[in-house]
């Protein structure tokens, strides 16, 4: 599967993928409440306070649609040499978005202008990713 369209999906359930699944090239979770993915039996990514993180780090997207998504935390691949490009429409009206983890490159103006809860600096202790011990 390379394309997944869950536009307007009104569920808070965790979406489950097979372990090591990384083939997704197009993801549409606009206008949805989808806030977490699980890969195999690995735990769902959470903050230290237990809030879910939408972990997109396994994927290299050609198209990503997040408009009006209710995720508070989104994690991209942590690659300095290949950051995920974000522009003014990537997080359009993601009013719940508080934090983005991983490396991104900002390719346009006003990227977070419609995200009133978003912050970059002064990360609180409970707003960080819990280390996963294996």
Image: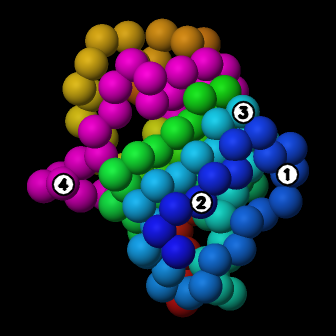
The magenta segment: 77-99
Q: Nearer the viewer, residue 10 or 55?
A: 10
Query: From the viewer's perspective, is 132 left or right of 86?
Result: right
For disc 3, the neighbor class at 10 Å (few under 14, some 14 to 19, many from 20) is: some
Q: Which residue is mark 3?
A: 31
Q: Which residue is mark 2?
A: 4
Q: Which mark is residue 82?
A: 4
- Disc on the earlier residue, 1 or 3: 1
> Disc 3 on helix, strand or loop?
loop
- Disc on the earlier residue, 4 or 1: 1
Q: Which residue corresponds to the image point at 24% horizontal and 58% vertical from the top-left? A: 79
Residue 86 in the image: x percent, y percent?
34, 33
Q: Which residue is mark 1?
A: 12
Residue 1 in the image: x percent, y percent?
53, 75
Q: Verify CB contact (< 8 Å) between mark 2 and mark 4.
A: no
Residue 46 in the image: x percent, y percent?
65, 58
Q: Verify CB contact (< 8 Å) between mark 1 and mark 3.
A: no
């Amino acid at each position: 599967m390379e394309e997944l369209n869950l536009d307007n999906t009104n569920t808070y359930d965790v979406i489950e993928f097979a372990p090591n699944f990384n083939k997704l090239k197009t993801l549409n979770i606009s206008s949805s409440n989808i806030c977490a993915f699980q890969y195999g039996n690995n735990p769902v990514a959470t903050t230290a306070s237990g809030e879910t993180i939408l972990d997109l780090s396994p994927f290299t997207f050609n198209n990503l649609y997040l408009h009006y998504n209710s995720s508070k935390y989104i994690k991209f691949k942590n690659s300095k040499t290949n950051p995920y490009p974000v522009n003014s429409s990537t997080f359009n009206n993601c009013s719940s978005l508080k934090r983005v983890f991983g490396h991104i490159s900002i390719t346009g103006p006003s990227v977070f202008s419609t995200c009133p809860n978003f912050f970059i600096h002064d990360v609180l202790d409970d707003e960080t990713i819990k280390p996963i011990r294996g």
